[in-house]
Amino acid sequence: MDWKTHDIVMDNIQALKQLFPEAFSEDKVDFESLKLLLWENISNDKEKYSFSWKGKNDAIKLALSQNTGTLRPDFESSKNWDETQNIYIEWDNLEVLRTLQDSYRSEVKMIYIDPPYNTWKDFVYKDDFHDNVSSYREKMGENMKSNPETNGRYHTDWLNMMYPRLKLARNLLKDDGVIFISIDDNEVFNLKKICDEIYWEDNFVNIISAKMKNVAWASGWWEDKRLKKNVEYILVYVKSYEVFESFNAIYNRTEISEMLDYYNENNISWKYTAVLVYDGDKKFVWSAIDWDWNDIKIYSRNNFIIKSIGQIIKDEWLTVSEVYSKYYNRIFRTTIPQSSIRVRVMEKVQELWINNEFYSIEYVPKSWKNKWQIYEQFYKWDKFNLFAWFSDVWEKDWEVVYKLDKLWTLWDKIDLNNLTKEWDIKFENWKKPIKLLKSIINMCSIWDDLILDFFSGSSSTAHACMEQNLEDWKKRKFIMVQIPELIDKNEEHYWEWFRTICEIWKARIRRAWEKILEENKDKEWIENLDVWFKVFKLDTTNLKKWETSVEWDTEVEIQKELQMRLQDMTNSVKEDRNQIDMVYEVMLKNWMDLTLPIQELIINWKKVFSVDNNHLIACLEDNVDIETVKEISNLSPNIVVFYDNSFKDDVVKVNAIQNLEKWEVQVRVI
């Protein structure tokens, strides 16, 4: 088995080979032939538009390089391991994204990230092309420093950090996948340029402006030359604009009593103040034809009852909210529309010399939301004022009435109150409003889509995913990635609870799911809600022979290293690793989802792991004989994995491999 992560360079070569086989000679790209095939479409303009910076070539190489890292399960930190489909991964997101390239390639529907904004207090990851997974342990404290504006490579360091991560993230998106990236005005233009390059300019969708701070024009606001910042931006790209269909419509929802208070405070006129308590005795008058030859039936209404909202409050001892809930479908205001139907009805009534105060019509529209359905409209007085219904522009959810305002690119009604103290965890940074993230999730994800956040901080995205699943009865899954950054010792709860941002995540999600389960224990759907998670930690490979090579300074050190490696040949697995660690590494290298079910079996007194109902069988025991191999084959696996030194002897090994391959089983020998 090849224990390196996915070879993106080879993918690119194979794709090029499919398109231009003539441009290859002995499996190498012949650029002169390629230029000839593309003819006039090769640019030689040295002054062409491009976006470049010092280190860009290394950033591209970093995105294309491979590692031999793996993800090790942390059962102790996880919750409900066997049932959950959610994943949390601790350690550097660049190496994690590289490690996920096989198992999650083209599997993610939505990515949301809130990366460092490159302000004076943000750290910027200092990636080194020669670093391997193990070196991050040693260099994390050194690398995770703030990036002051006095740094001569201020923007360059940030671009070198973002480019390879965004490049690797694109590979994980489905063809109809979407990425949302939060940023402020400090790097928004640079971010837009590198995203245009990585995701292609044609796949740019929008920039959303989100109000993220409540800025009061209080004393001192004039002291700075710049205007106060209260807006951040969310860049939106799709992987393929041609494949992507559309976003789900999302709305701001304002409760009726809150809206009426706002109208009163700001002296705004409110029109929906009348209720059609009884729509009267219905009497057919005549049929008419409108200008589009639609048949219209006209009725007069007698003995109808209309009351004001205030009158009903007094008569029935109801609150304002209760009235709008009870009479939701009967509340109206009148309007004078420029409608051909209204004109035709007026003409017909006047022609018949009918004198009534209240009319209704029935017809079948050929367009709009009531298309091809019998639709009823009401008109009042001699001017034929049309009844506009409150329920057409407001929504009723159970007993609560809300105003719906469709969201476009300006999001200015985000709840920012008590954000830092959410879930009894006071922490100034790393939090995004749950309402904001739920809106993003609702825009583009459906039943069981996978959501990724590789700058997850305190995991607001995971929290929002759980809450949104509860609201719309979906089964979205998430992968969160966060480096275990040390918390500033000046933070209020540093000594009491937390040392790293990952510990904050565990506390936050634990409190979130405890509250969700408690508040919704009577709902039937709660039994299907996945509020749990598997925790993995990035680490070096479990195999000694695939450890990234180290450069040694002297001949003596080289000899010592060779001697140690020869001694290790009898056992290729590291001493601190176990069989289940190895199973998950095998899954990663065989394009398998890390949440697939794993069952531990005993076959011929040997412990065997069955992954995904026998799709993969891993037998990592010693002294495996041919009888054990036969019993494994009876499970009809697709893939079987053994250690190289697992077999009783070489004869058993050869026979086992030959027999399994004869039964069309793929054999992996470690």
Image: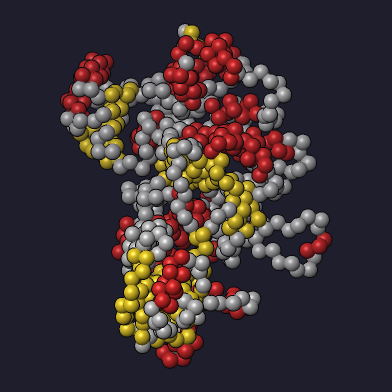
- Locate residue 474: give its quadrant: bottom left
Residue 315 rendering spot, x and y as whole percentages = 43, 91
Residue drawn at the location 48% of the way across and 57% of the way down = 250
Residue 340 visible in rendering:
yes
Residue 304 rendering spot, x and y as whole percentages = 38, 85
Residue closer to the observer: 167 or 554: 167
Q: Image height check: is 269 above or below 198?
A: below
Tally the marks: 0
Residue closer to the observer: 260 or 12: 260
- Locate residue 597: give its quadrant: top left
Report the side of 596 relative to 400 (left or right): left
Residue drawn at the location 30% of the way across and 64% of the way down = 524
Q: Where the N terminus falls, by quadrant?
A: top left
Residue 139 rendering spot, x and y as whole percentages = 62, 36
Q: Residue furthest top?
A: 26
Q: Image height check: is 556 above or below 395?
A: above
Report the side of 132 relative to 584 (left or right): right
Residue drawn at the location 41% of the way across and 23% of the way down = 2
Residue 146 rendering spot, x and y as whole percentages = 69, 44
Residue 134 visible in rendering:
no
Q: Where the C terminus falls, by quadrant?
A: top left
Residue closer to the observer: 627 or 147: 147
Report the side of 646 relative to 21 (left or right): left
Q: Residue furthest bottom?
A: 315
Residue drawn at the location 43% of the way across and 69% of the way down = 344
